[in-house]
Image (cartoon, rainbow, N blue to C red):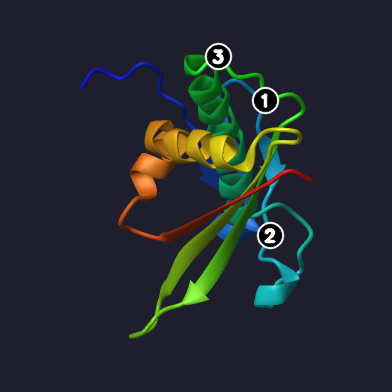
């Protein structure tokens, strides 16, 4: 496959307790272990960045699925939560909850559009079968 776009990032200074930057300069963040995991919490973390990326990407896929059906999503939004989980045998895994909010749209149609977005979204395709992803559709 030929890439349509390639993003780059560089982590320095200790990974979760370091810094992450991109060549464009748009990302330039201190990173820190969250307090819930025993860290200082005085920076961002990979899970926050993953939640932001997945929510944004899924919202874009949602809009594409709606356009294909000629449906106006109005003031829609997608919230993402990424959970760090302890897994058997040591180590860690992830789980994702996406909350899709589409006000004033028939709930059945809203769910169909969200299901289609889940097929289109690169993050969904990358994680499918690897981590639990729960998608909840609501109107508020």
Q: List the residue tagged with mark 1.
A: 73
Whether residue 104 is situated above or below residue 15 in the rendered picture: above
Q: Quadrant of residue 32?
A: bottom right
Crowd tier of the residue under label 2, counting other residues whose Cα lies within 10 Å: few below 14, some 14–19, many 20 or above: many
* Residue at x-position 49% and y-position 63%: 95
* Residue at x-position 30% and y-position 56%: 129
Measure the alpha-carbon separation of dots 2 and 3.
43 Å
Could you tell which of marks 2 and 3 lies nearer the N-terminus? Answer: 2
Q: Is residue 108 visible?
A: yes
In the rendering, at what x and y percent does residue 15 appear?
54, 56
Residue 70's tag is 3
Q: Is residue 14 visible?
A: no
Whether residue 126 is situated above or below residue 83 in the rendered picture: above
Residue 78 shown left or right of residue 123 in the figure: right
User: Of circles 2 and 1, which is in front?
Assistant: 1
Query: Which is nearer the eye, 4 or 62?
Result: 62
* Residue at x-position 74% and y-position 24%: 74
Measure the alpha-carbon separation of dots 2 and 1.
36 Å
Query: Which is nearer the eye, 29 or 81?
Result: 81
Is the C terminus in the top left, top right, bottom left or bottom right quadrant?
A: top right
Label 3 SS: loop
* Residue at x-position 57% and y-position 65%: 83
């Amino acid at each position: 496959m030929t890439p349509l776009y390639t993003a780059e990032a560089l982590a320095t200074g200790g990974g979760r307790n370091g810094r992450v930057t991109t060549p464009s300069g748009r990302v330039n963040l201190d990173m820190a272990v969250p307090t819930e995991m025993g860290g200082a919490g005085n920076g961002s973390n990979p899970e926050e960045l993953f939640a932001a990326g997945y929510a944004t990407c899924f919202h874009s896929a949602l809009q594409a699925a709606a356009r294909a059906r000629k449906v106006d999503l109005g003031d829609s939004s997608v919230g993402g939560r990424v959970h760090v989980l302890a897994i058997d045998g040591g180590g860690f895994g992830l789980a994702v909850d996406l909350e899709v909010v589409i006000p004033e749209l028939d709930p059945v149609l809203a769910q169909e559009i969200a299901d289609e977005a889940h097929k289109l979204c690169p993050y969904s395709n990358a994680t499918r079968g690897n981590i639990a992803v729960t998608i909840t559709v609501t109107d508020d």
